[in-house]
Image (cartoon, rainbow, N blue to C red):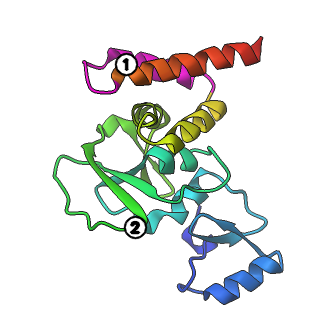
């Protein structure tokens, strides 16, 4: 999405002006901003909406990446980012963004709307690993798998090929359960 078509409160228009335009039906709310009502809300619009929260050398991940890929209607309350390079960053903690210091392999990163985002496979694997600690991550994983046919099997194979690590067994059991649920629904 071209940045000219995206409005963040306080940049070109104030929040009251954008709210009035939304009430009049001229713009719709997308994540952290607004876009014209006659444009399609795609992955690029969602990524553009949180571009200011994703610093250089990081990538949106977890629930944020799942939302950007099209899972869910509303963005997560707290966005997640991961390191996208070998150099460590000094990320200032905020209430809106959680920084994960684990590096994302370069082949697991896509650029959507000018924002680095973990790919669907990496996102699904991360959500499967963190779902036993954060209940919302299971919700985001289910939503991502629902819009990505075959992703559950690929994520299970990806995690199964990883070396032993904490949470691996639980994430495989979660994906097995989700695959069993999918089989029941398709029959």
Residue 42 image position (x, y, % from top left): 65, 52
Q: Which residues are magenta?
A: 149-167
Residue 130 image position (x, y, % from top left): 41, 37
Classify 10 Å Cα crowding around label 1: few (below 14), some (14-19), many (20 and above).
few
Extreme residue in the top direction: 187
Q: Which residue is mark 1?
A: 169
Residue found at x 76% / y 82%:
21
Residue found at x 36% / y 57%:
98
Residue 167 image position (x, y, % from top left): 34, 27
Q: Quadrant of the N terminus?
A: bottom right
Q: Is residue 169 above or below residue 111?
A: above
Q: Is residue 96 found left or right of 32 in the rendered image?
A: left
In terms of secondary structure, where does tag 1 sit? helix
Looking at the image, which is closer to me, 73 or 86? 73
Residue 91's label in the rendered image is none
Residue 95's label in the rendered image is 2
Alpha carbon separation for disc pair 1 and 2: 31 Å
């Amino acid at each position: 999405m071209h940045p000219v078509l995206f409005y963040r409160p306080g940049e070109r228009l104030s929040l009251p002006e954008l709210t009035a335009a939304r009430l009049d039906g001229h713009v719709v709310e997308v994540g952290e901003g607004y876009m014209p009502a006659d444009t399609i809300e795609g992955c690029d619009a969602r990524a553009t909406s949180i571009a200011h929260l994703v610093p250089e050398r990081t990538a949106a991940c977890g629930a944020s990446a799942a939302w950007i890929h099209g899972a869910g209607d509303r963005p997560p309350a707290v966005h997640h980012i991961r390191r996208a390079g070998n150099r460590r960053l000094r990320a200032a903690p905020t209430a809106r963004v959680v920084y994960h210091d684990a590096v994302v392999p370069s082949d697991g990163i896509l650029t959507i709307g000018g924002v680095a985002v973990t790919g669907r496979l990496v996102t699904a694997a991360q959500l499967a690993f963190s779902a036993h600690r954060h209940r919302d991550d299971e919700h985001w994983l289910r939503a991502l798998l629902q819009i990505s046919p075959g992703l559950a099997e690929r994520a299970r194979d990806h995690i199964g090929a990883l070396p032993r690590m904490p949470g691996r067994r639980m994430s495989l059991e979660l994906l097995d359960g989700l695959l069993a649920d999918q089989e029941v629904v398709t029959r």
